[in-house]
Image (cartoon, coloured by chain):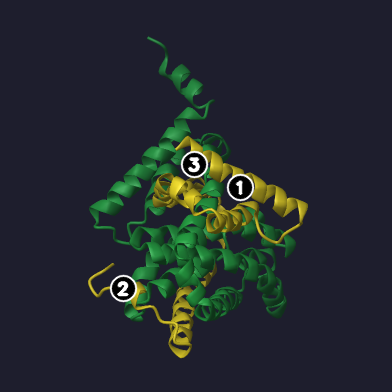
Chain colours: A green, B yellow
Amino acid sequence: MTDPLLIWSYLSEGPLLWLTATLVAYLIGDAVFRATHRKSWANPVLIAVVVLGLLLWGTGTDYATYFEGAQFVHFMLGPATVALGLPLYDNLPRVKKAAWPMLAGLVVGSSVAVLSALAIAKAFGIQGSVLASLAPKSTTAPVAIGIAERIGGQPTLTAALVLLTGIFGAIIVTPLLNALRVRDWRARGFSVGVAAHGIGTARAFQVNETAGAFSGIGMGLNAVLTAIIAPLALRLFGG
Amino acid sequence: MIATLAIILSFQLVGEIAARALDLPLPGPVVGLLLLVATCILRPSIAERIRPTTLGLLQHLSLFFVPAGVGIVAHWGLLREYGLGLALALAGSTVLAIGAGALAFTAVARLTGSEDPSAMKAPGDD
């Protein structure tokens, strides 16, 4: 029999192991999500990230090695973004009717996301490049990283903050908007797309297709508006 | 399925090229999204053709965020350093932004008479 260490060193070289692990961890997350009757706190991304984090830690694998396998899944973010065009097309009559409410939700949601984050962080003595990394955290990751680079943030920190914001937003949106008695699927989806980008949008699609379509629009519009707001807000808070 | 993937990847490809060539403030896939909507308006048959695979892909949108999400674990030390302040800033601003955004949306929908009874959540829903 071959030495297990040799098998391990073979597996740790190629993408097969971590690609498989990523899919299996997601399936575990999805199974837990379904088993809890689709409760928002059982977020599949969060569960998969925890499972994989423990696995990386237990096997002493670094993130770069993991990502060599997982990059194939990561790549699918691009096509999935394009795919959001279809529910948008399906909901076009609704979207046309909702231009003014969307404008209001966008301007309010986007500015509150940036300004309140900077205000709270500043109150805790956070400044400089960490403050700049925080400013675009509600924006979809590729755009957020671009904004952070331009305003003196740390791209990798921004990426982590973006993901945490998305997971938190996806978990909190249902109880929060139930408590505020917001019953309009368009408003529920749109606001989570603006505040919690793609992960919020994924949550919206799990619940309602109209919410998902509006969430995708909110995410796209917020990417554009945050690129304008973030540098101004950062100047306001002396970052 | 392969035909749908080829269509979607083509839109992404054209989107990436357009975003770079024209120096647009949008990432390539978002330009691809807009081109896909425009194409579906002009040729509704395309929408029907790509529908099954595309909606299947969106059902598992969460999966595609997992690799980037694991990056949080890689930056754990840095995040812990600023722990409480960052956690409160993230949580507080996200709650405020979702709440304020949704309320602004519904308030203006009421003011402009653009409410949509067909898009209302039933009391028992999630």
Position of residue B103 measured from the top left corner of the image (x, y, whole percent): 44, 82
Q: Which mark is on residue B121?
A: 2
- Amino acid type at circle 3 is Thr
Q: Which residue is mark 3?
A: B4
| Pointer 1 or 3: first along the chain | 3
- Badge 1 marks a residue whose secondary structure is helix
> Compared to A6, does A201 lie above or below?
below
Residue at image mark 1: B12
Mark 1 or mark 3, which is nearer to you? Answer: 3
Measure the alpha-carbon separation of dots 2 and 1: 33 Å
> Badges 2 and 3: C-beta atoms under 8 Å apart?
no
**Dot in front, 2 or 3:** 3
Extreme residue toward the top, this view: A1
- Closer to the camera in the image, A50 or A87: A87
Local SS, label 2: loop
Q: Chain of mark 2?
A: B
| Circle 2: residue type | Lys
Q: Please name the amino acid that badge 1 sits on.
A: Gln
Q: Where is residue A193? Give x, y as percent.
A: 49, 66
